[in-house]
Image (cartoon, rainbow, N blue to C red):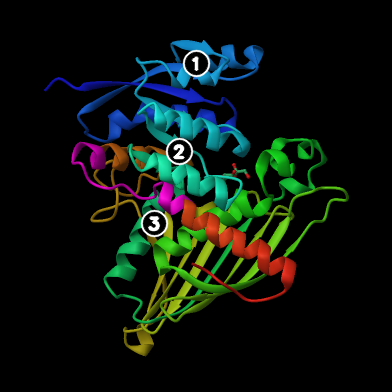
């Protein structure tokens, strides 16, 4: 069958732009969909870094003005991989021009921006790159929870730590400036924690948070610690920090239920730890499952059982599921409304940190 050609324009060409470029190249190799993606155009402000990036990742054209790019009739997909301050104007213009819109997380700098983006973008297929939902071990955790393997959930605790804030060479980057990023670690890392917690354990009912900035003069948060009550009756904690010295990209959750426990650590991302409390007491113990198949998420897409995968596969799987949903005219999650929901929780974190009070979410 002839595939439908879709031309992609990616705005941005930093680290995450490379990750997205790889996913756009690879998705057709691992997921059977009726579309063929063309890496038509990459857009960025700095030609001297843009041109080598375009040639290394096989983007056909380069451009420096995103306003012209989103207006081009030969572009069907706009992928946003730029600093957070530009997410809203690009997403809104692209959606108004009828494009499919893919946006890096966090969706926006504020709830107000996210609301405008979600409103306009509901008319077009859209996605927010909360990629960790598609790590096979995380998707398997979701399946086990939905099957009731944990019973009633008591606790959900999660950490996302890196050490970038403690690195003076990074301090001048956009991620450390309120005007460009909107917030610090909350938007950058806590947003992943909130999305994953909502995916696995449902909505947050209320929370109480403290945030802290270690670097003198920095106008964004470096660390956030949050106590959480979920709508399903469980209680939990979230911690995110850029001062987690010794941790490069430590994204962890641990869930305790009446019938078992699940534990995940991105730094060992092919594994999911499972404790089955329904086993006879003398046989109970934590199993370190290698989630590469058989009968596990994405086992049919990637390699044979035991042949492990990496960070980039979570982006490929995100895109694969997105185009599968598109071809079936089904809803895709996480979309801009999910990004907005995360933004609301992050705003409650900031308000709670300012006032010291518990905040109701939604
Ligand atoms: C940098 O802190 C970063 O690239 C985040 O922005 C990503 O969302 C996370 O997945 C890895 O770390």
* CA distance separating discs 1 and 2: 30 Å
Q: Quadrant of ligand 1?
A: top right
- Asked if residue 296 can be seen in this view, the reply is yes
Circle 2 SS class: helix
The N terminus is located in which quarter? top left
Badge 3: residue crowd in 10 Å (few <14, some 14–19, many ≥20): many
Question: Could you tell which of marks 3 and 1 lies nearer the N-terminus?
Answer: 1
Circle 3 SS class: helix
| Nearest to viewer (mark 1 / mark 2) | 1
Q: Is residue 352 above or below residue 258?
A: above
Badge 1: residue crowd in 10 Å (few <14, some 14–19, many ≥20): few
Badge 2: residue crowd in 10 Å (few <14, some 14–19, many ≥20): some
Residue span colored magenta: 324-339
Residue 137's label in the rendered image is 3
Residue ranking furthest to the left: 1
Is residue 9 within the magenta segment? Answer: no
Circles 3 and 1 in contact, beta carbons < 8 Å = no
> Residue at point 61% right, 46% down?
109
Residue 120 or 236: which is nearer the viewer? 120
Image location (x, y in percent) of residue 339:
47, 50
> Ligand 1 near label 1 (Cβ, under 8 Å)?
no
Residue 312's label in the rendered image is 2
Image location (x, y in percent) of residue 246:
71, 54
Q: Mark 1 highlights which residue?
A: 68
Question: Could you tell which of marks 1 and 2 lies nearer the N-terminus?
Answer: 1
């Amino acid at each position: 069958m002839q595939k439908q050609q879709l031309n992609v324009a990616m705005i941005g060409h930093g680290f995450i732009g490379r990750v997205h470029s790889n996913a756009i190249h690879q998705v057709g190799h691992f997921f059977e969909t009726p579309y063929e993606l063309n890496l038509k155009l990459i857009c960025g402000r700095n030609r001297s870094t843009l041109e080598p990036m375009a040639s290394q990742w096989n983007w056909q054209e380069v451009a420096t003005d995103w306003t012209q790019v989103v207006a081009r009739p030969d572009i069907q997909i706009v992928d946003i991989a730029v600093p957070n301050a530009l997410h809203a104007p690009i997403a809104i213009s692209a959606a108004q021009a009828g494009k499919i819109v893919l946006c890096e997380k966090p969706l926006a700098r504020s709830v107000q921006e996210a609301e405008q983006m979600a409103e306009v973008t509901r008319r077009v297929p859209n996605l927010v790159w909360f990629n960790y939902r598609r790590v096979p071990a995380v998707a398997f955790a979701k399946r086990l929870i939905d099957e009731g393997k944990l019973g009633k959930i008591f606790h959900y605790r999660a950490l996302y730590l890196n050490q970038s804030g403690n690195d003076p060479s990074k301090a001048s980057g956009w991620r450390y400036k309120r005007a460009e990023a909107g917030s610090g670690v909350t938007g950058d890392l806590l947003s992943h924690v909130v999305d994953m917690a909502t995916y696995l354990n449902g909505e947050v009912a209320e929370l109480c948070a403290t945030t802290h900035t270690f670097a003198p003069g920095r106008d964004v948060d470096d660390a956030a610690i949050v106590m959480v009550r979920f709508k399903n009756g469980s209680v939990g904690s979230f911690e995110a920090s850029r001062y987690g010295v010794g941790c490069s990209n430590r994204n962890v959750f641990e869930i305790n239920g009446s019938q078992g426990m699940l534990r995940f650590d991105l730094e060992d991302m092919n594994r999911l730890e499972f404790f089955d409390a329904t086993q006879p007491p003398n046989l109970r113990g934590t199993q370190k499952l290698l989630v590469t198949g058989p009968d596990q998420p994405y086992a049919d897409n990637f390699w044979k059982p035991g042949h492990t995968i990496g960070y980039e596969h979570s982006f490929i799987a995100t895109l694969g599921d997105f185009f599968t949903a598109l071809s079936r005219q089904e809803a895709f999650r996480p979309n801009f409304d999910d990004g907005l929901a995360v933004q609301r929780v992050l705003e409650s974190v900031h308000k709670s940190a300012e006032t010291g009070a518990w905040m109701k979410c939604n």
